[in-house]
Amino acid sequence: MSNQLFEDFEPVSETAWKQKIQMDLKGADYNETLVTKTNTGIDIKPIYHSDSAPQLNIPARATDNWFISQRIYAGNATAANKKAKDVLKRGSEGVLFIIPNKEIDPTVLLKGLPEYGIQIHPQFMDLDYIKQVHDINPKAYVHIDIINQLASDGNWFNDSKKDHYNYAEFIKSFSGYFSQFTVNTSLYQNAGATTTQELGYYAAHLNEYLNHYCDTSKEHDAGVYEAFAKAEKRINIDTSIGNNYFMEIAKYRAYRLITKAIGNLYSIDLKCYITASPSLRNKSLLDYNVNLLRTTTECMSAVLGGADTVYNLSYDAFFNKENEFGDRIARNQLRILKDEAYLEKINNAADGSYYIDTLTKQLTEKALELFKMIENGGGFVQSLFDGTIQRKIKESAAQELSDLGNGKKILVGVNKYPNADLPLQKEYELYPFVKANPRKTLIAPIVPTRLAESIEKAQL
């Protein structure tokens, strides 16, 4: 019966829809009235139709199989271990340790924790330390990105030659997914890069590693190449989730298309593992409870886009120290999405959406165009030394700030519907603004900056 419901209705083509829209506009300009321009260079149309929908072959990733994790700053091994055990009992399915230095004892830190679901993010490069971690838990996942170190700090861990040598040893010395290339794009997003730039920089960033280690047309590291060619390794992508709901869904799907495209350049069937967390870029001290709404929709975007692991950002992460209330609320937001919104029950919900498929295709194409421009300029690292990447991100960030100032971009509680009952505090546990750190660097570092900082400072 249900198959006969629409037999009496003629299918309506995209052209017919557009003609009807144009008629209803009664002379108003279609583009000015209904087409929305974005900072990505992609125009959002009022209608998407099967007639022009792209056919995408996105590498398989079931969105009903994602994991909830929690970020823990491991400044004290004993305290971090205790907290990890607690959150694993209370809804988290994994933990992500930020390890500031090699004085943190991995034996204490990892004691009694499960084998799987443990991400290790050392803020240093020390192969002996990593070997200690491997001896304790060979099933952990270690995330190290030497190019991110250069871009964020302005200096390598040691120097370019030694860092690249150590990185190769890191990949080859440990089997399986314990050691892999990591590309951290959170820095670019939090500094103000557009979605197109974030994806384009990802492609160029990834290509730096593959070109250095896996280009068989020149002298290369056979051990590293073989590990990826045999699918023994994959790419870790550490990301931040922006606030444009549908664009972010498309972004995470585009990450997989771009990974495959860059891998194809080296005849490698490249796989990736995406870790996602809400961005700090659009979070504010002003009416800070709105941050809860922002992080909820952002996490939802990442899940529907196909992120593998999601860890939430507490609403007060940038102005309060880690605390029980903020952590619990952040964790429970994810549990609600998984258990009560049933986002673990649906498989690839975005499939078949003409709008999201079109966005995914456009983002991928524009990102690869940007990647080619960067390669023509000597590659990503060279562009960092030239200052091109930093300049482009600053230009995008400045445009976004201008849009906030003139009301084109809305942040509820900041430039729209301010909450007079929740004024700024005189002091915060953590300094919520960018800190100056004068030092000698090889390049100008890329600096993450919250969009609302200048407005907040003006009100203090």
Image: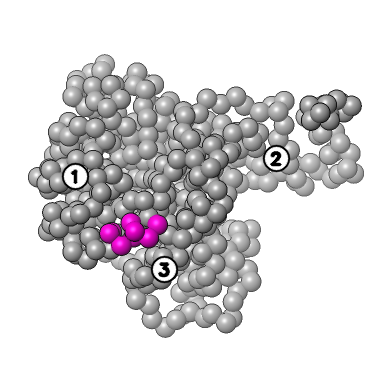
Percent x, y of residue 216? 25, 18
Q: Where 122 falls versus 252 (above or below)?
A: below
Residue 395 against residue 291 in the figure, above or below: above
Residue at the disc numbered 1: 137
- Front label number (3 vs 1): 1
Q: Please state if 101 lies on the left or on the right of 275 as rendered.
A: left
Q: Which image quarter: residue 97? A: bottom left
Q: Is residue 426 visible?
A: yes
Kindly identify which residue carries mark 3. 326
Image position of 29 (left or right of 102): right
Q: Residue at x 81, y 43 (%)?
A: 29
- In the picture of the structure, the residue carrying the numbered disc 2 is 45
Circle 1 — which element? loop
Q: Which residues are magenta?
A: 84-91
Is residue 397 in sight in this rendering?
A: no
Please name the amino acid that badge 2 sits on.
Lys
- Labels 2 & 3 near each other (Cβ < 8 A): no
Above/below status of 361 relative to 138:
above
Q: Position of residue 359 (x, y in %)?
A: 59, 37
Callout 2: SS: loop
Q: Of marks 2 and 1, which one's residue comes earlier in the chain?
A: 2
